[in-house]
Image (cartoon, grey):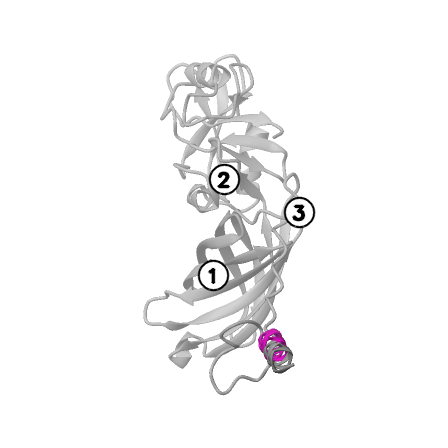
Amino acid sequence: MRKNITNAKIVLFLAAIIICLAACGGGGGSGGGGGSGSVGTSAVPLAPPSVDATGTWNGAYRSSTLGANTATLSLVQNGATLTGNYFNSIGGLGNVSGTVSANTATFTIMVTTPGCSGSFTGTGTMNNSTTTPATMAFTYNGATSPASCGGTESGTGSLTRRFIDKGNGTIYDAASNLTWLKNANCFNRQNWNDAIAKSNTLASGQCGLSDGSKAGDWHLASQQELMIFPDAGYHGSDLNTFGFSNVQTNFYWSSTEFSTNVAVAVYMNPYSNTHTGLKSTDIYFVWPVRLGL
């Protein structure tokens, strides 16, 4: 009888320990301070990204302290991680870090403007387009010092990603449905006949291309195609901040002919001048393009 009572006490003792462990969240409890007996909960995992924020975004925003300005975000998304840089129309600079969940970016901008310090946090909601200009509506708040740098600030804005780096030596312009050679100075200056020939024979494996294109897919940009950039207000050097490389603020040959011996060249700035040149002797820069993605 005594043995049975002893065994029963042991069973009850073990049961009490098990109940205690369950109530305390497992062996070791939930931390110091005597243990509250509460069970820990795991954080809800973020939804995987449904958009790719990689690219250069620019547009207008309104600051609570600095009024209306424009901003540019150059972003790279790797999985759910976001990095990049920021600049605005009044000289503000910063480094961007953050994450993307579903179609929303949560980011921090660490200010790198000379003479200023501080940071901003914000969110941006993007559409999912890769064939038309993507948009990002964003809000932010934070502070910079000294006060001349803006002080405590918040704002809202809308950015557009027109140019999409395809990662294969090409840049897609979603506004015009044209794919441009990313390197806008692969061939240096050429006469018109050579510019036509080099553009027509361009293929994957040349000029940094890995897009699978073949000879005949590309052509020398026409006057109308080249005018897309200056008509939108871009200098040649501006385009280098949108993912292109080696764009010259200078004359580019177009495929548009003026006469048998003369063709049209376009100067890359918003006040663009067109110019006629002799096909066989005048030399200008060369920029191939092709239609579609």
The amino acid pointed to by label 2 is Ser
Q: Is residue 194 above or below residue 250?
A: above
State the image quarter where residue 95 is shown: bottom left
- Spot occupied by residue 218 in the image (x, y as percentages of width and height): 53, 21
Viewer-side label of 2, 1: 1
Q: Is residue 61 above or below residue 283?
A: below
Viewer-side label of 2, 3: 3
Q: Is residue 52 magenta?
A: no
Q: Which residue is mark 3?
A: 128
For the residue pair 162 and 90, the one nearer the viewer reads as 162
| Mark nearer the N terminus (3 vs 1) | 1
Residue at left offset 32%, top offset 71%: 115
Distance of mark 2 from mark 3, alpha carbons? 34 Å
Q: Which residue is mark 2?
A: 272
The amino acid pointed to by label 1 is Ser
**Marks 2 & 1, CB-CB < 8 Å contact:** no
- Spot occupied by residue 199 in the image (x, y as percentages of width and height): 48, 19
Secondary structure category for the residue under label 1: loop
In the image, the segment drawn in magenta is 11-24
Q: Is residue 13 magenta?
A: yes
Q: Which residue is mark 1?
A: 89
Secondary structure category for the residue under label 3: loop
Distance of mark 2 from mark 1, alpha carbons? 22 Å
Residue at left offset 41%, top offset 74%: 149
Lateral position of residue 259 relative to residue 86, left or right: right
Q: Which class describes the residues within 10 Å of circle 2: few (<14), some (14-19), or many (20+)?
A: some
Q: Main secondary structure of the magenta part?
A: helix
